[in-house]
Image: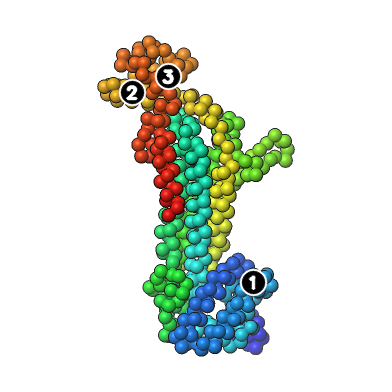
């Protein structure tokens, strides 16, 4: 029995009297999803082997053999000829088994002073770190594309909304820059999370550390980690870094989703503020006239999926006693799917931003509805000496009169306007125009076109750093 089991090369063979059932094998295996960790698993193993040799724990010759075997494995994986076996449970055992086939005893020595528990924690950290770097690049591209759009429309006037009711005129450039700010904070959050991801668990072994004279700082340096995890139990068991990453990813998706919602509304015939290039839209199988904004709709939908992963990971951790438990194998699929979803979404949005056509006439017509310059009239009266509350009241009466007359504030004759306040004079009409309204909000963070241009310059400088 023992001989038969060791032929199958299960890592714990001798301890068992009967083989694991096929159903349990399938249930416990992770190789079909964790094989994507392979490049990081190899990177981690090479750093470990290099340290073992430097410390005299394995020979230089063993290390050289391990390197040779790993190079071969890497090319087999890249060529798609590597044979992944369910019997070997996960990415770690598959690679180790193949290494031993290729280089014999040196392969069997690789696992000295290490456990799959600290190995997998290291692999995931390397993987998440690389995903963060990709995401930071994509956020920068998206911010750059939105800034280009903002620049083309620094003077394009649209209605700004609160409660989805016309509130005050703004520029489309200013509106785009709001998202540039959001995605900028998302990048800050990712950078901050990266610091906590970037610590080395290897050396914690199964949970308590190892009896071999290892040099963890050396491995950390080789792998580009900023520090080591300082407690072996914590190192192998916590996945807070993955949760933190997924929380930051959820916030990215939240911002993408709000943007998507606006794009979908703006492209509706009822609003007609924008068009999205055909390559980002799809048609209907029955209605020949349709062109649907599927990409933003799908992104809005995928946001829920990433939130779900965040919740899944939080629940995964909450009941686990220290240290490692097999529960943690369940961290991978939500994490991988989060990374795929966020990177695909950002890539497509960075591209799609360049495919947005703005319809300034429709935006302007909408801004002329709903008395968008009423606040400007109130501010005008305040500047003529009226207390703000009285000014607010006077303008409210004027707006009611416009409602009855079915005209805009700027369409009212001067004599009519003066019925609401004798302070109103000919110069009021400059204030009541859309251009006058936006240009007057001329301070840092305001919607005035020259402030939009200043903000664009600031973002461009940031992006160039
Ligand atoms: N595939 C496992 C995981 O993803 C590797 C660690 C397994 N360790 C163990 N003692 N069973 O977590």
Q: Does 447 sit left or right of 19 as displayed? A: left
Tell me if the residue at label 3 has its CB under 8 Å from ligand 1: no
User: Which comes sooner in the sequence, label 1 or label 2?
Assistant: 1
Q: Which residue is mark 3?
A: 409
Q: Nearer the viewer, residue 457 or 110?
A: 457
Q: Nearer the viewer, residue 342 or 243?
A: 342
**Is residue 213 positioned above or below 307 on the image?**
below
Residue 66: image x %, image y %?
57, 82
Task: Locate the C terminus by quadrant.
Answer: bottom left
Residue 77: image x %, image y %?
64, 71
**Is residue 354 positioned above or below 1 on the image?**
above
User: Which comes sooner in the sequence, label 3 or label 1?
Assistant: 1
User: Which comes sooner in the sequence, label 3 or label 2?
Assistant: 2
Q: Which residue is mark 1?
A: 77
Quarter holding residue 392? top left
Q: Nearer the viewer, residue 308 or 82?
A: 82
Residue 396 appears in view:
no
Callout 3: SS: helix
Give the spatial CA distance, label 3 vs label 1.
70 Å
Give the spatial CA distance, label 3 vs label 2.
13 Å
**Which residue corresponds to the image point at 40% horizontal and 38% vertical from the top-left?**
451
Residue 134: image x %, image y %?
52, 59
**Is residue 38 positioned above or below 98 on the image?**
above
**Is residue 356 positioned above or below 367 on the image?**
below
**Which residue corresponds to the image point at 56% horizontal and 52% vertical from the top-left?**
347
Q: Which residue is mark 2?
A: 380
Mark 1 nearby-residue class (10 Å; few <14, some 14–19, many ≥20): some
Residue 101 appears in view:
yes
Q: Does 175 sit left or right of 106 as displayed? A: left
Callout 1: SS: helix
Mark 2 nearby-residue class (10 Å; few <14, some 14–19, many ≥20): many
Tell me if the residue at label 1 has its CB under 8 Å from ligand 1: no
């Amino acid at each position: 029995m023992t001989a038969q089991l060791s032929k199958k090369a299960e890592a714990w063979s001798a301890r068992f009297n009967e083989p694991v059932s096929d159903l349990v094998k399938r249930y416990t295996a992770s190789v079909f999803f964790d094989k994507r960790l392979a490049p990081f698993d190899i990177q981690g193993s090479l750093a470990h082997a290099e340290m073992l040799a430097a410390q005299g724990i394995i020979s230089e010759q063993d290390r050289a053999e391990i390197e040779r075997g790993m190079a071969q494995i890497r090319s087999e994986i890249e060529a798609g000829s590597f044979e992944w076996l369910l019997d070997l449970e996960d990415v770690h055992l598959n690679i180790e088994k193949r290494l031993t086939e290729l280089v014999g005893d040196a392969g069997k020595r690789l696992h000295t002073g290490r456990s799959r528990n600290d190995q997998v924690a290291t692999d995931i950290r390397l993987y998440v770190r690389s995903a963060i770097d990709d995401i930071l690049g994509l956020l920068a591209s998206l911010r750059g594309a939105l800034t280009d759009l903002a620049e083309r429309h620094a003077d394009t006037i649209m209605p700004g909304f609160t409660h989805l009711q016309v509130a005050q005129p703004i520029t489309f450039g200013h509106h785009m820059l709001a998202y540039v700010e959001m995605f900028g904070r998302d990048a800050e959050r990712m950078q901050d999370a990266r610091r906590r991801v970037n610590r080395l668990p290897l050396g914690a072994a199964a949970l308590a550390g190892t009896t071999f004279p290892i040099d963890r700082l050396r491995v950390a340096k080789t792998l580009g980690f900023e520090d080591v995890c300082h407690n072996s139990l914590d190192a192998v068991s916590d996945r807070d870094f993955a949760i933190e990453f997924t929380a930051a990813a959820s916030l990215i998706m939240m911002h993408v989703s709000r943007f998507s919602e606006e794009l979908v509304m703006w492209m509706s015939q009822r609003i007609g503020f924008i068009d999205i290039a055909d390559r980002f839209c799809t048609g209907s199988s029955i209605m020949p006239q349709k062109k649907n904004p599927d990409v933003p709709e799908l992104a809005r939908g995928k946001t829920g999926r990433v939130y779900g992963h965040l919740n899944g990971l939080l629940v995964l951790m909450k009941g686990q006693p220290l240290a490692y438990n097999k529960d943690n194998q369940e961290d991978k699929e939500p994490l991988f799917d989060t990374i795929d979803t966020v990177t695909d979404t950002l890539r497509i949005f960075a591209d799609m931003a360049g495919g947005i056509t703005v319809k300034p006439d429709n935006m302007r017509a909408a801004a002329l509805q709903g008395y968008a310059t009423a606040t400007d009239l109130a501010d005008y009266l305040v500047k003529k000496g009226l207390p703000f509350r009285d000014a607010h009241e006077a303008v409210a009466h004027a707006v009611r009169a416009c409602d009855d007359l079915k005209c805009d504030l700027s369409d009212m004759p001067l004599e009519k306007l003066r019925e609401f306040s004798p302070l109103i004079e000919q110069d009021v009409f400059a204030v009541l125009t859309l251009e006058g309204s936006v240009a007057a909000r001329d301070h840092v963070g305001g919607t005035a076109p020259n402030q939009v241009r200043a903000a664009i310059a600031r973002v461009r400088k940031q992006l160039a750093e």
